[in-house]
Image (tube, helix red, strand yellow):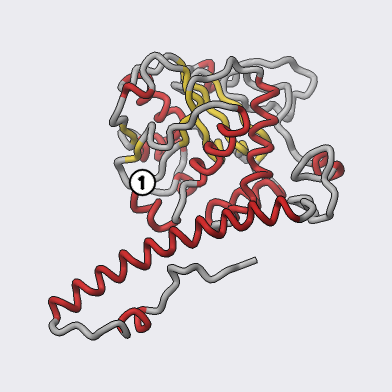
Amino acid sequence: MTEELPGEVESGQIRELGEPESETHAAGFQGAGSVIRSMLASIGRGLKFAGSAVVDLCLPRSCASCKKIGTLPQKSWCGPCWEKMALVAPPLCPGCGRPFLDAQASPDHLCGDCIERNYRFDSARSAALHVSAVRTLVHQLKFGGQLKWTPCLVELLETAYAAWELRAPDLIIPVPLHPKRLSERGFNQAGVLARELGRKIGIPVSPDGLVRKNLTLPQTRLNREERLKNVKGAFEIFDDRKVRGRRILLIDDVFTTGTTLSECAKVLKKKGGALEVYALTVTRALPD
């Protein structure tokens, strides 16, 4: 259900509080109004998310895909939709987790990227292929602010994490957004997913463990070489004490070429002194 956020206040309504006496005062007042609207919008998003959680507790949960009531044994998905989901499964690359869809009878083996050591993370996994209902829900969360899909996507992350049998990391860090994009979107989808996964598996989360200092182009518009150049030097660590000597689990929504996750891992290891870095995403997009 779409709700009007408290931050969506018409500028005319704010000016009713009093007309500025000069152009200088007017500019200052408009600036203050912008700050107030931004603060109210953030509060509204938080209340909306909290309200959604209350509704989930009070009403039977429906399937995130077909919307039918009754989703056991999965909390967010009914049995038939869970069975139809394109979950990432063996055979796959033990390095980056890429599934080999055209070689179902083969054992797990390294892909070309991992043989050539193109990635700086120690290993990675994804829960499902970036197709169908899961792809739609990721996009609605990421670009539409549909925070209600967080539980069902985190359920996928939790399932993939359990199947991975990874030694428990010391810290979870989400792939960060640039402050400008964070301000525009209102939240970091990777941060939302990381926070909820950390709560469920009992691992501390550091939302600011990494920061994005460069406003990069959207990776979806770029090829692999352009992606590498786009994210090179884009991330930084302000406090290496959080990661030095620790095992880090990176969280993001989609693994496409792995360039963003690899760059994050490189910074965590080279500049932060992280012992090991692993990556977990909701979906894995494969080349056509």
Q: Position of residue 147 (x, y in %)?
A: 58, 53
In this rendered view, identify the residue nearer to me: 145 or 241. Answer: 241
* Left or right, residue 186 beside residue 131: left
Q: Horizontally, is 183 left or right of 128 in the view?
A: left
**Dot 1 corresponds to which residue?**
178
**Which quadrant would residue 167 be assigned to in this image?**
top right
Image quadrant holding the N terminus, namely bottom right
Residue under the image location 15 percent in, 84 percent down: 21
Going by the numbered disc 1, the residue's amino acid type is His
The percent position of residue 79, horizontal first and vertical second, equals 85, 41
Q: Position of residue 27 (x, y in %)?
A: 19, 74
Q: Position of residue 44 (x, y in %)?
A: 49, 62
Disc 1 crowd, CA 10 A, few/some/many (<14, 14-19, 20+): some
Please determine whether, in this image, residue 266 is positioned above or below residue 185: above
Residue at position x 53%, y 71% in the image:
4
Is residue 137 positioned above or below 9 on the image? Answer: above
